[in-house]
Every structure is written in structure tokens, then in C-alpha cells.
Image (cartoon, rainbow, N blue to C red):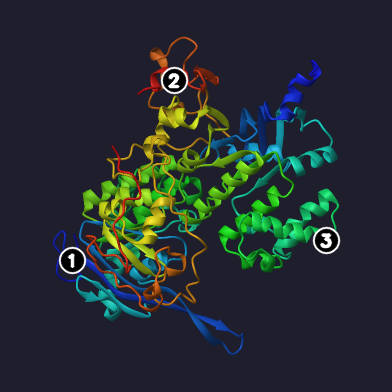
Amino acid sequence: MPESTGNAVAPGEPLLEVKDLKKHFPLTQGIVFKRTVGHVRAVDGVNLTLRRGETLGLVGESGCGKSTVSKLLVALEKPTSGQILYKGRDVAKMGGRALKDYRREVQIIFQDPYASLNPRMTVGDIVAEGWSVHADIAPRKGRLQRTQELMERVGLNPDFVNRYPHQFSGGQRQRIGIARALALQPEIIVCDEPVSALDVSVQAQVVNLLEDLQDDFGLSYLFIAHDLSVVRHISDRVAVMYLGSVVEEGTDSQVYTSASHPYTQALLSSVPVHEPHLRGLKERILLQGDVPSPANPPSGCRFRTRCWKAQDICATEAPALVDRGQGHPSACHFAEARTVVPLEG
Amino acid sequence: MSTASTSAPSGSARAGFGPILEVQDLRVQFRTGSGLVNAVNGVSYTVSEGETLAILGESGSGKSVSAQAIMGILDVPPAEITSGRILFEGRDLLTVSAEEQRKVRGPGISMIFQDALSSLNPVYSVGFQIGEMFRAHRGMSRKDAKKRAVELMDRVRIPAAAQRVNDYPHQFSGGMRQRVMIAMAIALDPRILIADEPTTALDVTVQAQVMDLLKDLQRDTGMGLVLITHDLGVVNEVADNVAVMYAGRIVERGTVDDVFGDPAHPYTDGLMSSIPQLEAKGGRLLPIGGQPPNLANIPSGCPFHPRCPKRRIGADALPGRHCAEDVPPLRLVVPGREAACHYSEEVLGA
């Protein structure tokens, strides 16, 4: 493992810490004289910890800010405020050499395997492109061989090194994206909805591949998805996001079997299960209305406008993400563990 | 007082006993630059009153194309319906005139689509678009049509319908847009509603709301629902019967309980074991190997055989049941269940 960004981190130690991260996008009006008329609070106070070798799942519905978090983490966007600490160092204060190393060590896989690969480049060029910036990873001489090894490792035929992305299926393209991320020997891979665009039968192949690679290379994953079943399967810990902030966090079984935030409970209750014998056993919680606009979020608790437990305090005081006796942190004044999904067996 | 003629099949279909919609051996091809694409290869199914039939398949399995053929919205050319019959209340829609088709489909069969935003016209208000159904098919005045539109928006539970009737599609959220589409689709009380991936673009909490609405509407009107989807969870929770499609064919059919509880086709079996569970962390996923077939070049014999763990080729195969050579017909495997596999009996109970 390359250790150019300073001291090594032992397994289980925090590798990446996100502290009160915020990203507000300005809303402007006018063409010549642009006035800022408001802000979309895409990410509004997110705290996360990613430990070495683990997978942290981040779930939430569209517009909750999970993809913005991923862009902030790979330094594609600059945070409005808050900190991202990588091995104890603030990413915002990194520059030059350190930032270059950070960008190598934290890689990303995107959702859309069609849009995220340059159609005019061969697979070999796509996988090897990172080495033109980080030349020390692979000596110029052996690059073709390294590319083919990587392709083989992710389950692609190495003979296809000169083919173009359009000659591959969706699942194979996602493997190309994975090989590209692996080429730079990262510590962390941010997986932003990596299997959402894939067919069910192919999705499992890619999930298994990601698990194998994690074991082989000791990778840490931030796994962002809206599919709660996939997230449970792959994650050690899970954070649930709603309207720009994390509402509940815990191990996969804490969040899935004793959800304590009403939003998590509603989310779990809405997921259709595929086994006939479990049909109808799940508690039914049907939420009213839609997610409010992040440009004008409700005061106090963000979820209160759709919550059946809401009281006066919810409108005035934003609940902190803390353990209120339910065993894991939850951002609800009235957090209470509840089993929504029937336990197997 | 009944005579022999009133108990004829067509009469009973109208009374709600037999199937309302019957698709027989439908075949659709597309002529493209890269050759002939066989999208639908002999699909047959029936839908009865109050029934929910799910058509389950992955992308390219022909599930949407077969529905588009029923609705008469295929682009011809490049598409071509090469054979088959589509019987609605006993009448073959493929042989009657275009004008007649329009009269039958409008009030009889309607359809909703995955992408509500691109299915609605951005320059007309939603009230106008819902009202169009009444103006075009019932000759109603604009004013009356708008009044009916408000009623319908109420019925699909759009809050403050009277205030929102003049709003434009972009002013609605994804879930609300899908409700507008549903309002248009149920405006004329159709006997059959075809829903093509109606909730795929929606978040799970909104998906639950929309599926709930569709079930309630079905209970009220007794319409038959054809639900086209790739989501096994949605099928399990809302459908009565399921037809699993692969490479333009139905490979398994039966009640959802039977098919999902104990699959008879290796493809269905593979799908069930390749998706992670919500209620338990579970062990390693067991994916189906390989890639879905290219419809321009469908494998010989059973189209699933290159990916099938149960295939028998060469000396292993029984006579006439060679997976790479003999196309397995959709046959009755156990009562109430059909599967297109030579060796279904070995898949069942496994």
C-alpha cells in the first residue's frame, strides 16, 4: 500500500472523517446582474466516519444530497463549510503534492456506465489514463501488461484492451470504471450508485466483484445507493440521509432491524420485498406528501412536515444525531427503536 | 331466460368472466442497420377483470415492446408485427381499421409510462391534458372537461386539485406527475390499464404511494392491470399472476406465490437468488453468469442456455431436449404453472 499521504492507518481506525460538512449552491436571478436570491442547502451538516477496510453505506432518496457528498469527498466540489479529514489532515488545506496524492488515494465509480466513459478512448487508454498524472504508480514500460492484469481482475477479457466502450454491455462498462479506479491503487473508493443502472442479474455480479476487491486490496468503500437491500448486503455500517443531513446511523442490523428515526422506518416499510411468504408481514407506513425543497427546508427537524410523531419542539429545535437510549445515533426528539421489517426465520 | 347465444364466449367476456384482453402468439421485429432484431418472439397471455398480471423482465426482454404493440404505438417501420392476434373483448385489434382501433383503445385500454415528465406536454396545463380525454372521446366542452379533470385529480389524490388544475407539468413533483398520468389513463374508465414501469423513476416512499393508488383504483373499477416491471419486489407485493420474459419469450408463468416461491425455470430461479434481501444480511449473492442476449443474434435452442447452470448439452441431453438445439416450448409443468424449460422438473423444489 502506498503511504505518501503520511502515516499509515491500522484496520478499523478512522481513515476519513467528515465533520459538519455543508455545501450550499447559490440560486441566482438576472442575466447581466446576477443576484443571489437564496441557497439550495444540498448538504447541510453531515458527519461521517469511514474506517479502514469497512464499507459505509449511505442511503437516501433523490435530492437528499448523497451525490453531493460524494463529489465533495473526491474534491470535485469545494465545501461551503465543514471539514473532511483524511488520515487526520484537512483536505481543504491540502495543496500541491498532498492534494494530488489525496486524489489518487480516493477514487470514485459513477452510476452511469455510459456517460462516465469517454466514447473516443479505448478501454486500455481509459484504465491507464490516471497513470499519465500519477506516473510513479506504473512504470511506462509495463503499462499495457498492468492494464490487462487489471482488466482480468475485474472480469473483462484482456484481449479487448483496444475496444471502445460502446462495444461493451452496461455491466462490463461498470467493470471498466472499477478497473480505472483500481489502477491508481486507492485506499478509498466512493461508489456513487454503482449498480443502480444495471439489470438485476448483472447487479449481483458487480456487487460480488466489489466485495472480492475489498478483501484482496483492503479497500474502504463509501457505498452510496437508494436501494436499501443492496446497501444492507454490502455495508458494515449504514447512514440514512434526508434533505441534506444524516438522520440515523448504525451497523446494518441496528438500522435495519431496530430503526429509530421515523423516516428510516417509513423508508424500510416502503421497500417491496420479493419473497411471497414475507408479503403483508411488514408494517405499512405510508408517508404523506413529497420531500420539501432544499432551497427552503422546514425549520427545526427537516422531516417534521411528513412525520406522524411531530410535536411543537420539532418545529423549533433541530434534533441532534445522538443516541437517546435506542442503541445508536438518531436525529429525532422521539427516537424509538421499532422493527418494521420482519426478521428472517 | 338465457339462450345459447348469450352464453357464448364473447358474451361472457363482456360480463366479466372470461379474459378481457387476450394476446396470442405475438411476434415483433425491428429492421435496423445492424440487422433484424427479434424483440418479441411468440408471446401469449390473457388478462381478466380485476386481475393484475405482472410482466417481469430485464432490459431488452421485450416486455415494453409487447405492450406497445397492444396500444398500437409501435413505430412502424422500423417495427413490424409479423404475426399474432390481440383480442380485446373478442375483437382482433390488429385486423380492424385505424379509426376503429382508436375507438376501442381510447375508452378500453390505456397506458401509463415510466417517464411522466416526457410523456406530458410541457406547454399545456395538466387540466387541459386530462380534459382532452373527454373532449376527444366524449365531445365535451372545455369547461365541462376541466371540471371532470378536477374530479379526476381529486381521485388520484393530488392535493388542492382545484387550485392546481391550471398548473403545468414542470410545477409538479415526480410522484404528482405520475398521478396526473394515471388520471389521464383512468379518465374514460378503461377495462385494461397497462402500466409500463410506472414507479421505476420514483423514490421508494413515493413508489409505495403510487402503487397503493393503483391498487385502490383497480378495486373500485375492476379494471385489469398489466404491470410491466423489472422489480421483483413490486411484482410480489401487487400482482396476482406473473409472466417472466427472457429474450422476447415468456419463460415462466403462474401465480406470484407459485413462481416466486418455487421457480420452475432456471432464469427465474437465478433472479431470485441474485437479489439481496432487506430482512437479512444474507450470504454471498449468486448471480446469473454472462450477459443478457443480443436480440439480433439470439442463441439457438433455449435462449437462456449459455447462462444456464442446469443446461444439458451433448451426451447429457435427453432426445429432443437438447438445450442448445431444441427450443423448449412453454408447457404445463405442474397444475397452474407453465415453464419453457426442458428440465423444469429438476429446477422445481431445488
Distance (Cα) linking label 3 and label 2 = 57 Å
Distance (Cα) linking label 1 and label 3 = 72 Å
Q: Residues within 10 Å of mark 1 (few under 14, many from 20)?
A: few
Figure check: B30 above or below A115: above
Residue ID for mark 2: B344
Number of numbered discs = 3
Q: As shown in the figure, which amino acid type bears the numbered disc 1? A: Glu
Figure check: B121 above or below A339: below
Chain ID, mark 1: A
Residue ID for mark 1: A3
Q: Is residue B307 visible?
A: no
B36 to the left or right of B338: right
Name the spot of residue A287 as percent of width and height, x first. 47, 58
Q: Does label 3 or label 2 sit earlier along the sequence?
A: 3
Q: Residues within 10 Å of mark 3 (few under 14, many from 20)?
A: some
Query: Does dot 3 land on a helix, a strand or a loop?
Result: helix
Query: Does dot 1 land on a helix, a strand or a loop?
Result: loop
Q: As shown in the figure, which amino acid type bears the numbered disc 3? A: Arg
Nearest to the eye among marks 3 and 2: give it: 3
